[in-house]
Amino acid sequence: MVQRRRRLLDVETILDAALACIDERGRLTMADLAARLGASASSIYHHVSGRPEIVELLRERLVARLELPRLDRSEWGSQVAAYMRSYREALAEHPNLIPLLSEQTMTAGSVLLGYDRVAAVLGAAGFPEDQVMLWVSVLDSYALGAALDLAAPDEVWRAGGGDTPALEAALRAAPQGRARADAAFELGLEALLAGMRSRLPVGPV
């Protein structure tokens, strides 16, 4: 009798399977993950400690793709804008991952170093220390929402019955699909950065 060869596991294989589960099901359970891998849950635990660690490792994967602030002498707003654009794009590829990332404390070293870079560029720009994490939270919230918008269907609003004339006129005038999402993101990003500049106690560095 020919024995079935057991699938060899490693961390990257587990993460690939976990992301596939999240993309397809909008959730991640160890039972679903074991079934996808064709392995036992216990064999997965030989490589990762559990679901929280898997989510943090997926967060690290995402951060590795971001254009983090360079901490050079270039204008802080352009660095933040580049960071936000890359953050939105990376999140939008796996929108079902967003709730999982939001529900647990960030602990991964490379992730915290990424946030340290953002905090450093804001501090160097002149934002008061007690406001830096508030602005980091605002940037995070905007990127998360914009990523979900980018992953939304082309037709977000369906109106045409005549009882919403202002909305219908606005929809006719606006770009559609990806063009609308991109234009909305850039408009909001411009407004966000302008608002941040207006709150600086001194001129931008």
Image (cartoon, helix red, strand yellow):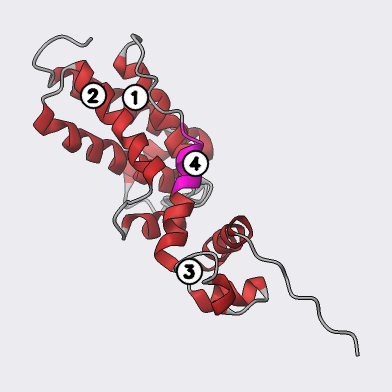
Q: Is residue 204 magenta?
A: no
Marks 2 and 1: in contact by CB < 8 Å? Answer: yes
Image disc number at residue 90: 4
Q: CA distance from mark 3 to mark 4?
A: 19 Å
Mark 4 or mark 2: name the one nearer the start of the chain: 4
Mark 2 or mark 3: name the one nearer the start of the chain: 3
Q: In the picture, residue 78 is in which quadrant? A: top left
Residue drawn at (23%, 41%), measured in percent from left and top?
A: 137
Image position, residue 135 (x, y; %):
20, 33
Region of the chain picked out in magenta, as a range: 60-66
Amino acid type, label 3? Leu
Element assignment for label 4: helix
Q: CA distance from mark 1 to mark 4?
A: 15 Å
Q: CA distance from mark 2 to mark 3?
A: 35 Å
Amino acid type, label 1? Val
Image disc number at residue 122: 2
Image disc number at residue 80: 1
Q: CA distance from mark 1 to mark 3?
A: 31 Å
Name the residue that disc number 3 marks: 28
Mark 3 or mark 4: name the one nearer the start of the chain: 3
Q: CA distance from mark 1 to mark 2?
A: 9 Å
Amino acid type, label 2? Leu
Image position, residue 75 (x, y; %):
32, 11
Element assignment for label 2: helix
State the quadrant of the C terminus.
Answer: top left
Number of residue marks? 4
